[in-house]
Image (tube, rainbow, N blue to C red):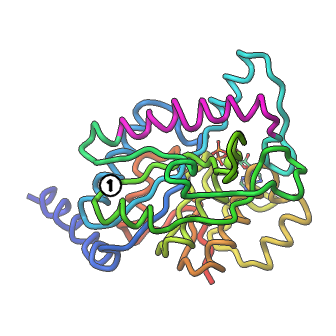
């Protein structure tokens, strides 16, 4: 009897959040580093379906770090990271598109569909919905900076109850151009701002942003982010992630969260319970 009451309590705890977020768009960056094993992937899919069925509109943007590295190694193609960005030449771009827009995108799309969603996989080249130019004058090769997002494409998909699953590749708006590799975090924040998302959530492989002593920073301000980047506390793949958080909140998104994708059901815990986890950045 007590157990049943507890279950009812747990469900009731979610009620205010379900009311608050019904019909709101949430952009979820599903990091390559959080796509660890089949069980975790399954739990991720369950969480997305639950959010979808209670009326939240999820939009997934995914990364693919490890799988791209594995394929590059198999093909004996070298690539390096500068400022947390993968320097991308034409050969690397071909692999990025194959792995990110191909196998990973279809894996996530299939998983969600097998759990009962109507997920639709796409890259920025589809419907030409996301276009880019070279980032920082081509400092990172074919790494692009998004210049336009046709938000109507996403809005139409959401209105038709699709869950868009977006691989962060942009069109160059030019025939014969291989397109641009976009850092998935920055793509997620740009997309979130363009489509009027309420939240953007970055699922990664760490509990959140850590300070010099490896303690969790549960909130971060713009000033702290600049300081931690400057003194090296925030480095590597965390750099584009915090930049993306700032870009999202400056673009009108209410809150940006960095959460631990290794924790089972971390999405549900963050969104539908009072126990926030990870790091939150808000205006
Ligand atoms: N101050 C910091 N706090 C937390 N993590 C940090 C910090 N500085 C650097 N990092 C690194 O950032 C990593 C997360 O970024 P990373 O790009 O590796 O993952 P991801 O974005 O989730 O995956 P992907 O890039 O494949 O989509 C952490 O695993 C950690 O090593
Ligand atoms: Mg990353």
Q: Residue at x 43, y 56 (%)?
A: 267
Q: Where is residue 142 in the image (x, y as percent from the top left)?
A: 79, 44
Asked if residue 124 lies left or right of residue 210, the reply is left
Where does label 1 land, which residue? 162
Residue 249 among magenta residues = no
Q: Which residue is drawn at 86% across and 47% down?
A: 140
Asked if residue 136 lies left or right of residue 133, the reply is right
Q: Nearer the viewer, residue 251 or 180?
A: 180
Q: In this view, does 150 lie above or below 172?
A: below
Q: Of helix, strand and loop, which one carries label 1? A: loop
The picture quadrant where one finds residue 40 is: top left
Does residue 215 appear anywhere in the picture?
no
Quadrant of the drawing holding the C terminus: bottom right
Mark 1 surroundings: few (<14), some (14-19) or many (≥20) residues within 10 A? many
Q: In this view, does 3 lie above or below 40?
A: below
Q: Which residue is drawn at 51% across and 63% down?
A: 277
The span picked out in magenta is 88-111
Instruction: Pick out the residue farthest to the bottom.
Output: 283
């Amino acid at each position: 009897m007590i157990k049943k009451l507890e279950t009812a309590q747990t469900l009731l705890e979610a009620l205010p959040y379900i009311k608050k977020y019904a019909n709101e768009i949430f952009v979820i960056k599903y990091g390559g580093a959080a796509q660890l094993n089949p069980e975790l992937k399954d739990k991720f899919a369950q969480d997305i379906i639950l959010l979808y069925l209670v009326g939240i509109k999820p939009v997934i943007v995914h990364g693919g770090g490890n799988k791209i590295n594995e394929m590059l190694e198999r093909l004996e193609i070298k690539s390096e990271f500068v400022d947390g960005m993968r320097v991308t030449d034409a050969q690397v771009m071909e692999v990025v598109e194959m792995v990110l827009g191909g196998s990973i995108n279809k894996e996530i799309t299939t998983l969600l569909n097998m759990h009962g969603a109507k997920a639709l996989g796409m890259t920025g080249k589809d419907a030409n919905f996301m276009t880019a130019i070279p980032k920082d004058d081509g400092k990172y090769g074919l790494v692009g900076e998004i210049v336009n997002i046709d938000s109507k494409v996403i809005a139409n998909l959401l209105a038709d109850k699709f869950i868009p699953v977006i691989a962060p590749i942009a069109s160059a708006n030019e025939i014969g151009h291989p397109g641009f590799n976009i850092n998935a975090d920055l793509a997620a924040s740009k997309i979130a701002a363009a489509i009027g998302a309420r939240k953007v959530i970055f699922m990664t492989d760490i509990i959140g942003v850590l300070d010099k002593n490896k303690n969790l920073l549960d909130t971060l301000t713009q000033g702290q982010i600049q300081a931690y980047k400057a003194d090296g506390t925030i480095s590597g793949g965390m750099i584009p992630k915090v930049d993306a958080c700032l870009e999202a909140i400056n673009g009108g998104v209410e809150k940006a969260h960095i959460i631990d994708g290794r924790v089972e059901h971390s999405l549900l815990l963050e969104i539908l319970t009072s126990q926030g986890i990870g790091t939150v950045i808000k205006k």
